[in-house]
Structure formats: C-alpha cells, structure tokens
Amino acid sequence: MENSSMDYSTTILQLPNDCLCLIFQHLDCSCDRESFGLTCHRWLQIQNSCRRSLQFHCSLNLLNLSSLSQSTSPSMSAFHLFKLLNRFQQLQSLSLSGCIDLPDSGLTQLQYHGSKLQSLNLDCCFGITADGLALVASGCSSLTILSLYRCNVTDSGLETLAKSCLALEDLNLAYCSLVSDDGVRAISQNCRQLRAIRISYCKAVSGIGFQGCSQTLAYVEADSCKLEPDGIRCVLSGGGVEYLSVLNLSWNIRGDGLTAIGTGFASRLRVLNFRFCRTIGDATIVMIARGCPLLQEWNLSLCHEVRILGWRAVGSNCLNLKTLHVNRCRNLCDQGLRALRSGCKQLSTLYITRCARLSSTAIEIFKLSRGDVEIIEDEIACIAPKQAFRF
C-alpha cells in the first residue's frame, strides 16, 4: 500500500519571485536589505529589480560643499555609472550630487533605463551641460523633481528638457549662472504642473520669463536675482504663489518696486522673505499688508526703510501673521513696536535683535502685554519652508 503521508516541507528559497520581492520591500533596515542580495544570485537579481532609490557616497549630504575639489572629493566615472544603471533598471530616485567629474556621457544610460525615474539630483555636477540635459530629456519623461544646483546648464538645455519632461513639478536652478529668462520661459510655458522653482543667484534672470506661468506654481526662491518690477509681476502672474523669497534685492529694485506683490496677484501668499531688502519702503509694506491677507510669516530683517507707517500697516492688516522677523531694522522704533503689539493678534513668534531705535522699556512692555508671543533674539531666513511646502 502506497504511503499516503506526503512531505509538505518547503523552504523560503522555493518562494516565487513576487513573494520574495514583497519580503524585500518590507525590510526596514538598510543592512538587512543589503544582506538580502548576498544570499544567492537569484536573490541578488530580485534585490536589483526591487531597488527604487540610489544615492552615491559622493552625494552632498555626506560632504561639505567646501570639500568639493578635484583632489579631495570621491569620483564617479561614466563607466561606474554605466554599470550601476544597467544593474538597477527600475530606479525612481537617483542622486548624483557632488559627482564633480561626471561628464555628460555618464548620463547616456538614462536614455534606456530612465523611464521610471521621478527624481534626479545633479547638484554640483560641474561637467553636466546642455548635452547632459538632452540625455535626461530623451529618457526621463516621468521626471517630477530635478535639481541642477551649480550645474553649467544653459537655456538651450532647459528648452530641450521642457519639451520632454512635461510632468516636472520641482526644479532647482540656483547658481546656474548661464540660465536667463529664455530658459525660465521654456520651463514655465511647457511644464504646466510646475509647483516649485529655485533661481537664486541666477544673475541673468529678470523674472519676465515667468509671464503666463501655471497657477500651480506655489514656491519661488529668487534670492539675489536681478528681478525687475515687471519681472516680479510675471513671477506672480499665475496667481498661485504661496512662498516667495527675494532676499537681497536692495541693490537692484529701488524704493517701492515690489508693490506688485500687494496688487492682487499674490493673494494666496503665506510666506514672504524680504531679508536684506534694505530699500523697501512703507508704500510696498502697506500694499502687501493690505493685499496679502493669508500671510503667515514675513521676514523684514534689515529692511531699513520701513518706518512707522509700514509697521502700523503690518499691525492693523496682517491678521493671520504668526511669525515676524524684524532683526536689525534701523527704523523700528517704540511706536512701531507698539503698533505690532496692538495688532497682529495671531502672532506667536517675533525674531528681534539689534534694533537701535528700540528702547528696552518698549520691549519689556511688549513682553508683558503679549505673553502669547515668543521673543527670539536670533536671525534666520524663514522657518523650514520645505516642511510647510511638501514638494
């Protein structure tokens, strides 16, 4: 008689690939995930196919920017990147930041294996030019986040990119000195889902390239740019900007060239950074205080031309203001602080230090009258913008 008992024993090695892939995806510890691929060749292939993110050891979060030099920083050759992109063909996020020697040709494999890539970081990849962007454009049509901080890209490269990467939402062009309004125009006209852009220290950008931008554009960093009054209007033309940083425009826009912010185009504005805008006057402050009712944080540090009329406008109109920066404002006097104390009913944090015209008595009266406001004698730009705006 045949033995009816059967051996149902099995091992994890007999599980199908989709089950093993699910197990791999639930491994939280990086050591466990790396050890997974050391089990056998089959498991290594599963690990390779399941990897969605890749960040090289030369990435800037592991280095100080000052350490980026030919002699000290780790290098990533085109050959190394070729092998890795061939191995990991399902990547959704790739960071090459700090790979200063990487040439345009190093991005060739993105033409073939970049279709699922959604996030690409090329910060301080000084060898990447318009040719490299063309390779990105040809293979990474699903890209939503692209950082080109300090890259040598040009307007022509951005024009090529804008024709293919239509889903782009977050673009960092800070310190891209070869980019002008033409490149910005190509992005703003073609990438209609753009939500965040950083153009700080792009000296050839006046802002007019933003004319007709999508209403999805909510986050703009334009520190130390040569923005013109017409350019400011173009930046706001979509009507959706919620975060605007124009730090250090004092040497370019004189007097009240920023009044456009308060004329209705920025009615959704929540965070505004005017730090180091030394020539911004009362007329601008009054217009913005009245025209931006949703404003929650305003940095006016070193805005020396804001006087009593400006401070009164902030106090009486900024009903939703929670955080205010007034560090080193030469013309913030006791009357101005009284206006802020009497108004700004939602204020919870005041950054204040080294205001020469303020008396210690006025500050103490403010503390007694507004115990709900935290006084911080420190100077920062703006509170954690990336936490408030999850792009």
Image (spheres, rainbow, N blue to C red):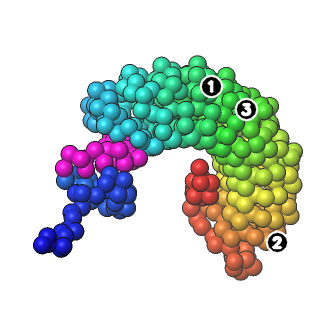
Mark 3 crowd level (few <14, some 14–19, many ≥20, 10 Å Cα): many
The residue where tag 3 is placed is 210
Q: Residue 98 appears at what percent x and percent y?
A: 38, 37
Camera-side residue: 261 or 99?
Answer: 99
Kind of residue at badge 3: Phe
Kind of residue at badge 2: Ser
SS at badge 3? helix
Question: Which residue sits at x=20%, y=45%?
Answer: 41
Which circle's residue, 3 or 2, is located before the other in the chain?
3
Q: Residue 236 appears at what percent x and percent y?
A: 77, 40
Which circle's residue, 2 or 1, is located before the other in the chain?
1
| Separation of residues labelled 3 and 2 (CA atoms) | 39 Å
Question: Which residue sits at x=53%, y=27%?
Answer: 137
Q: Residue 96 appears at what percent x and percent y?
A: 39, 37
The residue where tag 1 is placed is 163
Question: Which residue sits at x=72%, y=44%?
Answer: 216
Q: Is residue 318 magenta?
A: no
- Tell me if I can see residue 43 in this picture: yes
Q: Is residue 60 magenta?
A: yes
Mark 2 crowd level (few <14, some 14–19, many ≥20, 10 Å Cα): some
| Separation of residues labelled 3 and 1 (CA atoms) | 16 Å
Which circle's residue, 3 or 1, is located before the other in the chain?
1
Q: Residue 360 appears at what percent x and percent y?
A: 67, 71
- Tell me if I can see residue 248 in this picture: no
Q: Nearer the viewer, mark 3 or mark 1?
A: 1
The residue where tag 2 is placed is 342
SS at badge 2? helix
| Separation of residues labelled 2 and 1 (CA atoms) | 52 Å
Q: Magenta segment, which residues?
A: 40-65
Camera-side residue: 377 or 359?
Answer: 377
SS at badge 1? helix
